[in-house]
């Protein structure tokens, strides 16, 4: 995947994101692409779907 802004090859990174849901902290961990040049972060359709699934599962446990 190349950066849409500067056409540099993007690297896969692991993103950790803490969100607050109904007074509970939920930690989401997912893969995304980051451009080493401009630090733009992009996700593929698969990565986005995986993140949404994770959110539904973790929010269901609250
Ligand atoms: Zn870029």
Image: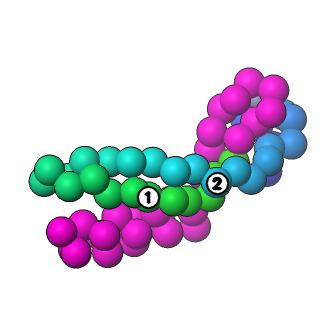
Secondary structure under badge 1?
strand
Instruction: Locate residue 26 relative to residue 50 in the image: left or right.
Output: left
Mark 2, ligand 1, within 8 Å: the answer is: no
Q: Which residues are magenta?
A: 34-62
Viewer-proximal residue among 58 and 32: 58
- The C terminus sits in image quarter: bottom left
Residue 36 to residue 59: above or below: above
**Disc 1 from disc 2: Cα separation:** 10 Å
Residue under label 1: 28
The structure residue drawn at horizontal position 32% and vertical position 75%, both measured from the top left corner, is 57
The circle on residue 58 is none
- Residue count near mark 2 (Cα–Cα under 10 Å), binned few <14, some 14–19, many ≥20: few
Q: Earlier in the sequence, mark 1 or mark 2?
A: 2
Q: Position of residue 27 (x, y in %)?
A: 40, 57
Find residue 4 and report its image quarter: top right
- Residue count near mark 1 (Cα–Cα under 10 Å), binned few <14, some 14–19, many ≥20: some
- Could one spot residue 25 in this view of the protein? yes
Residue under label 2: 14
Q: Position of residue 50 (x, y in %)?
A: 49, 69
Q: Position of residue 19 (x, y in %)?
A: 32, 48
Instruction: Locate residue 49 relative to residue 46 in the image: left or right.
Output: left
Residue 23 falls inside the magenta stretch: no
Residue 61 to residue 33: above or below: below
Q: Position of residue 9 (x, y in %)?
A: 86, 42
């Amino acid at each position: 995947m190349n950066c849409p802004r500067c056409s540099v090859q993007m690297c896969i990174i692991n993103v950790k994101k803490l969100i607050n849901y109904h007074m509970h902290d939920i930690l989401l961990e997912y893969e995304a692409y980051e451009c080493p040049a401009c630090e733009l972060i992009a996700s593929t359709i698969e990565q986005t779907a995986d993140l949404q699934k994770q959110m539904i599962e973790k929010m269901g446990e609250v």
